[in-house]
Image: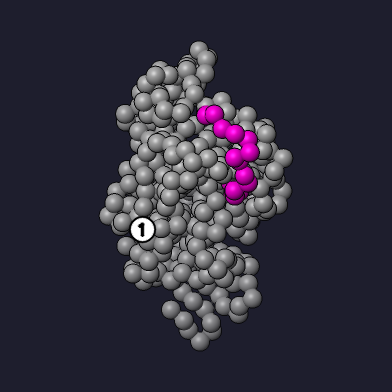
Amino acid sequence: MINETNIFEFDAVVIGAGVIGLAIANEIADNLDNVLVIEKESDFGQHVSSRHSGVIHSGIYYGHNTLKAKLCVEGNKLLYDFCERNNINYLNCGKLVVGHSNNDLEELLKLKSRGVKNGVEGLKILNSEEAKEKESLVKCTNALWVPSTGVVDSHGLMKTLEQSCKNKGVIIQYNSEISTLLNDLGKYRLNIKSDNIIIESKYVINSAGLWCDSIAKMLGINDYKIYYCKGDYYGTKSNHKYKCLIYPLPETHGLGIHSVIQLDGSVSFGPNAYYVDDLDYSVNSEFKNDFFDSINKYLNIDKKDLYPDYAGIRPKPFGLHEKSKDFVIKDEGEKGFPNLINLIGIESPGLTCSLSIGKFVKEIILS
């Protein structure tokens, strides 16, 4: 609501209209009357939420009892159900994680064991012949079959969430970048850059993706640092129509260069992983040979068929020489900022977890 001093009052403000921010707003709007989503871009999902593989992950990669494991397994089921109910395009194609040696087989068995412990269903170790029954063109000695993996129309998902938010009375304000964020006597006060407007809210949910650490720092919370981890994707001119996704064993900073089946049947490969200082979505052509070598371990392709497709940047909460960390989703009351919920380092499997993260944040608010 507006008063004569140009102060807008809300029950909750969600910063960021990526898939996570929209999913959170859609959930909390069931319990809070006045919810605002603030987005600095002109439309939803212009960064992390639209520059990825579009994969619905299963939950095999993440340590037991981590947020990533819990929210991915829950989110996988929620996402398929949401797509069914809302006519969002998806493909539950499954995936093969491939190995080429006895050592690789040991790693595949570890992945299977971790997935089973996390509650992932239907996992099976296959030999070469069995893997070829899933995808005749695959090259491997053994593979882990993961039937709950798929791909989703992330734009359609966000469009549906945006409309659902609006139907619940959520205001989504695009082209609005936050210049200051202060805690003032139990309320949060936000200023929008270039506007003479102040927003007051009891709850603030920081879902700013690549800028989540910058938002936290506005309140003097300096615990978080986001590193830009870039990943390129190469398309292929080949007419092969693959039946399932194919992944190598995971690497230090990502899941490796894997096949990406688009919903129109076309195929890309990626992403690689390297750290950058600036936001630049151009594809680095220097890595073409690396892509060719990586892909040819599990598929026969011709280098001339590969072309630069697109790139994305992941918000990594750790540097080049650190191990992967879990999602941070927490009320910062212990730091003196009650009702501020920071979401830090929401990288993969963030898309899969979007709906379960929405529910998780709602539970924090209602607790």
Q: Is residue 362 above or below residue 301?
A: below
Q: Does residue 337 appear in this view?
A: no
Q: Residue placed farthest to the top in the image?
A: 102
Crowding near pointer 1: few (<14 within 10 Å), some, many (20+)? many
x 48%, y 21%: residue = 140
Range covered by the magenta-colored residues: 299-318
Q: Quadrant of residue 276?
A: top right
Nearest the camera: 133 or 30? 133
Q: Is residue 125 above or below residue 354?
A: above
> Picture coordinates of residue 355 (x, y %)?
38, 51
Whether the magenta-drawn stretch holds residue 160 is answered as no
Amino acid marked by disc 1: Glu
* Left/right of residue 344 with respect to residue 220 in the rendered view: left
The residue that label 1 is drawn on is: 27
Mark 1, secondary structure of its residue: helix
Nearest the camera: 179 or 237? 237
> Picture coordinates of residue 262 (x, y %)?
46, 46
Q: Is residue 3 above or below residue 353?
A: below
> Picture coordinates of residue 260 (x, y %)?
49, 41
> Picture coordinates of residue 75 (x, y %)?
37, 44
Nearest the camera: 262 or 199? 262
Looking at the picture, the colour scheme in use is one colour
x 63%, y 72%: residue = 193
Q: Residue placed farthest to the bottom in the image?
A: 4
x 63%, y 29%: residue = 293
x 68%, y 38%: residue = 287
* Left/right of residue 129 with respect to residue 297 in the rendered view: left
Q: Does residue 159 appear in this view?
A: yes
Q: Please identify the quadrant where the N terminus is shown.
A: bottom left
